[in-house]
Amino acid sequence: MTVKGTPGRVIRVDAETWAEYGEVCEAKGLSRAADLRVYIKREIAAHKRRLRSDSES
């Protein structure tokens, strides 16, 4: 469990990509974790929209 109460997750990313991603996130004013949460939530919402669209067809 992390300090903020959410469980930590482990992902495998090479060092160069992780460092560059850190620069991207810093430019966006987000931590890597916050940026990943935004991405994950966006993907879930898109998936749910596709499911609704498919069921309406």
Image (cartoon, rainbow, N blue to C red):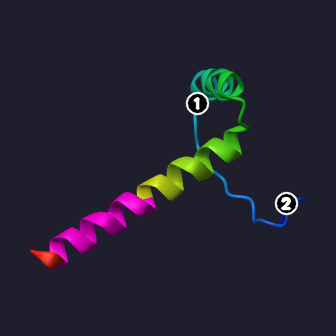
Residue at image position (58%, 37%) is 13
> Measured along the vertical axis of the image, is residue 8 above or below residue 54?
above
Q: Which residue is mark 1?
A: 14
> Measured along the vertical axis of the image, is residue 57 above or below residue 46?
below
Q: Position of residue 53 (x, y in %)?
A: 20, 69
> Measured along the vertical axis of the image, is residue 21 above or below residue 6?
above
Residue at image position (61%, 27%) is 21
Q: How many marks?
A: 2
Q: Amino acid at mark 1?
A: Asp
Q: Which region of the structure is painted magenta?
A: 44-55
- Whether residue 41 sits left or right of residue 33 in the image: it is left
Q: Quadrant of the N terminus?
A: bottom right
Instruction: Specify the label residue 2 is tagged with.
Output: 2
Quarter assignment of residue 50:
bottom left
Most extreme residue toward the front, as rendered?
A: 56
Q: Nearer the viewer, residue 42 or 33?
A: 42
